[in-house]
């Protein structure tokens, strides 16, 4: 008899920008075992409940959606038995480190803090994050740091980090919906 390998999926998104435009940097992480449930919710929202609203939208963005849509998505997410949500909020004015004045280092630092607080069972992890860093060296730096911090408090064996435009994975749209109310 072979053991069934458990895989956790983490979808990460930030609210606002990581530059100096906003007062806060908020990262949200949605952890699920079965992303197909998230996909099904989005498909049903597009087909039935919010068909007219989402007809021309390539993705669900909380800041461009009605409060009714955001509330509905959060309610559906709340009904999932395997979903866990993690947030980290950084008030940028209280960040005094010269090291963190670099927006890439700041993002990595905040994402690392988020990762170190995510509680997972053993198994593999697939992380899906928005395609925000253009240079490969920046992506590699983030990937190493995030994986190291994720493995600090959990018995994770293998971590895969994938990047794409946020509309490529319907499931990652929930991370956006989560970040916006926190903002």
Image (tube, helix red, strand yellow):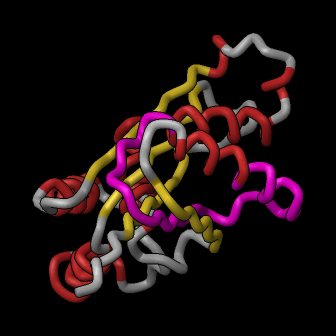
- Name the residue located 55 percent from the left edge and 32 percent from the top edge: 113
Placement of the N terminus among the 4 image quadrants: bottom left
Q: Is residue 116 found left or right of 36 in the rendered image?
A: right
Question: With respect to residue 164, does 134 lie above or below?
Answer: above
Q: Residue at x 23, y 61 (%)?
A: 73
Looking at the rendering, which quadrant does residue 49 occupy?
bottom left
Tell me residue 34's x, y (percent).
28, 73
Q: Is residue 181 left or right of residue 135?
A: left
For residue 21, side relative to residue 82 (left or right): right
**Magenta stretch holds residue 136:** yes
Image x and y of residue 157, in percent: 50, 60
Residue 27, magenta (yes or no): no
Q: Quadrant of residue 136?
A: bottom right
Labels in figure, total: 0
Query: In this view of the protein, which residue sits in the foreground, 99 or 62?
Result: 99
Q: Give the extent of the magenta segment.
A: 116-143
Residue 89 point in image, percent of width and height: 49, 29
Q: Position of residue 148 (x, y in %)?
A: 63, 44
- Name the image quarter holding the C terminus: top left
Q: Nearer the viewer, residue 95 or 21?
A: 95
Classify 16 as above or below 32.
above
**Rendered position, 43 above or below 103:** below
Residue 173 visible in the displayed image? no
Residue at horizontal 44 percent and vertical 56 percent from the top: 176
Q: Note whether residue 108 is visible.
A: yes
């Amino acid at each position: 008899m072979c053991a069934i390998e458990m895989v956790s999926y983490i979808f990460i998104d930030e609210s606002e920008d990581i530059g100096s435009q906003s007062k806060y940097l908020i990262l949200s992480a949605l952890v699920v075992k079965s992303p197909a449930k998230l996909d099904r919710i989005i498909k049903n929202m597009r087909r039935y409940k919010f068909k007219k609203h989402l007809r021309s939208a390539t993705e669900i963005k909380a800041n461009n959606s009605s409060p009714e849509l955001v509330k509905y998505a959060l309610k559906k997410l709340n009904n999932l038995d395997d979903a866990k949500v993690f947030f980290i909020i950084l008030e940028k004015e209280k960040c005094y480190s010269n090291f963190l004045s670099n927006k890439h280092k700041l993002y990595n630092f905040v994402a690392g803090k988020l990762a170190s607080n995510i509680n997972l069972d053993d198994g593999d992890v697939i992380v899906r994050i928005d395609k925000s860093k253009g240079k490969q060296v920046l992506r590699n730096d983030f990937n190493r740091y995030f994986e190291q911090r994720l493995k600090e408090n959990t018995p994770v064996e293998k971590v895969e980090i994938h990047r794409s435009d946020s509309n490529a994975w319907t499931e990652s749209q929930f991370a956006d919906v989560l970040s916006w109310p926190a903002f």
